[in-house]
Amino acid sequence: MRKAAPLAIVLLLTLSVKAQTWVDSVDLHGREQFMPAEKYKWDWGQATFLNSLIHLYQSKQTEAQKKVYLDYVKTAMDATYAVANGKHPNAVASAHGMAFLARVTGDKKYLDKAQEIYADYLKIPRAKNGGVSHRAETIELWDDTVYMLNMFLLEMYRLTKDEKYIADFLEQFNAHDEKLIDPVSGLWVHGYDDDAIDYNDGCSIMGWPDKTTRKSSQIWARGNGWVGMALSDALNTVPRSSKYWKPMQKAFVHYVESIAPLQEAVSGHWYQLVTLPKEPRNFLESSCTAMFAYTITMGLKMKILDKKLYGPMVEKSYQGLRSMSLKSAGAAYLIPTKVSGGTCVGDENYYLTRKITEGTGFGYGSFILFGTAYEQWKGTRK
């Protein structure tokens, strides 16, 4: 009679099947514990997590592997179908799931919903330069917006091959760049107030716009992380023959050259207020780190960036996130830590006193997006 394998060996074998790298462990906890598909919420943070699962779907080699992620997206979109809308950018964000399903399954109901949401998107209030307002109640441009729109617009392009969606994205990038760019750092401030009326959204610091420029004062790391991910995903989607590719490539290289020197040398992380590394109250923040590292990794994958210069940076971030910004949750689970919580617009003190949390949709999503891209670049993702 064969003896049963020791429990430790059984557990080790189970882990090796379920989770190959820290990316798989974050993915598992996100899908099974943090946000089961049937409990999906139609919002921006969850949309980032959803997008990371679609990236995992695209990374898999077999239909059986892909089915795990396809089933998740389908369940999540079916659960929120009745409330799905595009009345503001944070609502538009999740709609990439509908467009993805329309493309992959061919089911007309998802196409109908995606088209309905695009019609909503066209009605969102805009600034005088055409930038889509982050809020429906007042006209403000936030750096977050470009990614929330980008996820949906790129998936609509993949679905239809109609370049109007790429034109939409580039229009929004340029409108936000015009109002948010900081000429000294080359990065974006968080917000711009277009209507010159201070609005109390219950989250931002009242009076945050400068009286003259109407810009906010701080260069927030995660806000700039959204910008880099939007540019890299657009470049990875649009053919190089498109007239839109070179303008986006130019903006991408400028962005990377601005953000790369600000990486903390030992940990591979970036700071919450990214241009103030010597501020005593500043802290290393993990979600922005994953976003910046994702952007640089995508540049390496696309051979836009020099491997000798930028390769060591993403190596340091991949290892640094594992050693500093993940915690075990038992079994094959890992949870992102050192994540700055949901953040509106404020002054220096506002950003430096944000609650540091763990998990969150954008935490899981940014970690998975970076880790997957890195492992594909290294040739280790199965």
Image (cartoon, rainbow, N blue to C red):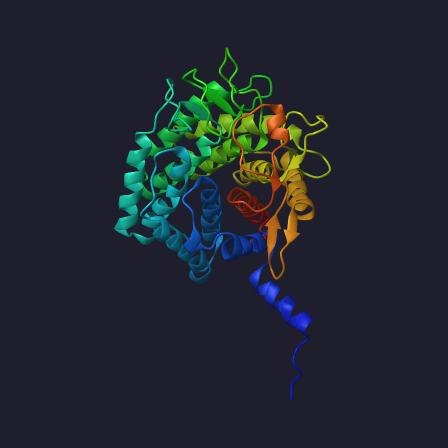
Residue farthest along the bottom direction in this orientation: 1
342 and 49: which one is in front?
342
Numbered circles on residues, count: 0
236 and 259: which one is in front?
259
Q: Residue at x 46, y 25 (%)?
A: 200
Residue 337 sits in quarter = top right
Does the rendering let one see residue 357? Answer: yes
Where is residue 95? Give x, y as percent.
37, 42
Does the rendering let one see residue 382? Answer: no
Q: Residue at x 66, y 28 (%)?
A: 261
Residue 131 sits in quarter = top left
73 and 133: which one is in front?
133
Where is residue 329? Give x, y as percent.
62, 56
Residue 86 sits in quarter = top left
Which quadrant of the rendered structure holds the C terminus? bottom right
Residue farthest along the top direction in this orientation: 212
Image: 278 above or below 230 = above
Image: 57 above or below 122 = below
Q: Seen in the image, is 245 located left or right of residue 6?
A: left
Where is residue 91? Give x, y as percent.
39, 38
215 and 230: which one is in front?
215
Which quadrant of the rendered structure holds the N terminus? bottom right
